[in-house]
Image: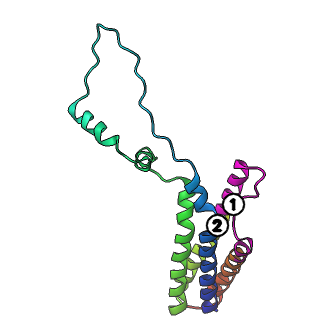
Amino acid sequence: MAIVVLVLWAFTAGAGFYVLATSSLGRARAAAPATPSPQPATVPAAPASVSPAAPSRREARRAARERWDPPSLVAAKHAPVLPSGRSLVEFAHPAAGITGLAFWLGFSLVHNRALGWIGFGLAAATACVGLGWFMVNTRAARRADPGRPGPSFAGRMVALHGSGAAVTVALAALAALVLHG
């Protein structure tokens, strides 16, 4: 039974990668306008009696270098240090799935119950994160354009990926309960 779950898990992962590769999520993000580079604030003219402070040599060199920066570098310099929630979920869903698959492979080989339960926990967490990711993307697309049904996915593949994940989680729990270590 552990081998069946392993094969089903690998099949579900393949369907997920296909959905990701054929979806419009990456193109939608790439087509989004880049964050504009911040324009220097205009300083009101100083009275004639007050002379403006001259920039230091270091500031002058930095300004000379930065004027040739491409817009992507300017945006990266002004981006937040922590990733957005969307980026975190886009990484966590496949990463947790692959890690869980590795634990399940270990369980399939040695039938250690701890590996089975870790694999099951990662499968369940991956399913929850994936469902949340899908719902958030669909909701955001509807908010952006109410006439559009949501992100462009291959509907059958999403259904196949989701149902494969549900069956995988159920069979993983059953196998971890039944098989003894």
Q: Which mark is residue 23?
A: 2
> Is 105 placed left or right of 139 in the picture?
left
Q: Does the magenta stretch include residue 114?
A: no
Which amino acid, by three-letter code, is at mark 2?
Ser
Question: Residue drawn 73% across and 74% down?
Answer: 159
Q: Nearer the viewer, residue 133 or 1?
A: 133
> Is 88 placed left or right of 70 in the picture?
right
Viewport quadrant of the N terminus: bottom right
Q: Where is residue 179 in the image (x, y as percent from the top left)?
A: 61, 91
Q: Position of residue 142 (x, y in %)?
A: 73, 52
Distance (Cα) linking label 2 and label 1:
7 Å
Q: Which mark is residue 73?
A: none
Q: Is mark 2 on a helix, strand or loop?
A: loop
**Is residue 91 visible in the rendered structure shown here?**
yes
Where is residue 90, by image quadrant? bottom right
Question: Residue drawn 64% across and 66% down?
Answer: 23
Q: Where is residue 134 in the image (x, y as percent from the top left)?
A: 67, 63
Q: Which of 153 and 121 is in front in this view?
A: 153
Residue topped by disc 1: 151
